[in-house]
Image (cartoon, helix red, strand yellow):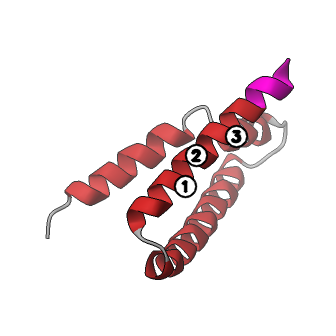
Amino acid sequence: MTLKPYVVVFASIFMAELGDKTQLATLVFASTPGASRVGVFLASSAALVVSSLLAVLIGERLGTWIAPQHLTRAAGVAFLAIGLWLLVTAA
């Protein structure tokens, strides 16, 4: 068993999450006076685990109906569309 695919997944998700609004929200919650840092960490970690589980389960289902290269292209188009929408609406 090679670890390369899992290292790629880890690195990709780690880089995508840096500076992400999820991470910024966690930062805000952690900076709230009286908030338990451990509680904020556990809650944000659990949220990421649950959302990742949903992505894996949905991705597994979609992978049986749609070819992976089509899913990759659709994800790319969706990211571009979201980026363009954010650029247009930010002005």
Numbered disc in front, either 3 or 2: 2
Residue found 21% across the figure and 55% down from its top: 4
Q: Secondary structure at mark 3?
A: helix
Tell me what residue is drawn at x 70 percent, y 56 percent: 39
Of callouts 1 and 3, the N-terminal one: 1
Task: Give SS at disc 2.
Answer: helix
Residue 17 higher or lower than 40, as above or below? above
Residue for point 56% across, 67% down: 55
Whether residue 24 appears in magenta in the rendering, the answer is: no
Residue 16, percent from left and from top = 52, 40
In the rendered image, the vertical position of residue 9 relative to residue 51, given as above or below: above
Residue at screen point 49% across, 80% down: 65
Q: Which residue is mark 1?
A: 74
The one nearer the camera, 74 or 8, is 74
Say which quadrant the C terminus sits in. Answer: top right
Range covered by the magenta-colored residues: 86-91
The CA span between labels 1 and 3 is 12 Å
The residue pinned by badge 3 equals: 82
Indicate the quadrant containing the N terminus: top left, top right, bottom left or bottom right: bottom left
Element assignment for label 1 = helix
Q: In the figure, is residue 70 to the left or right of 2?
A: right
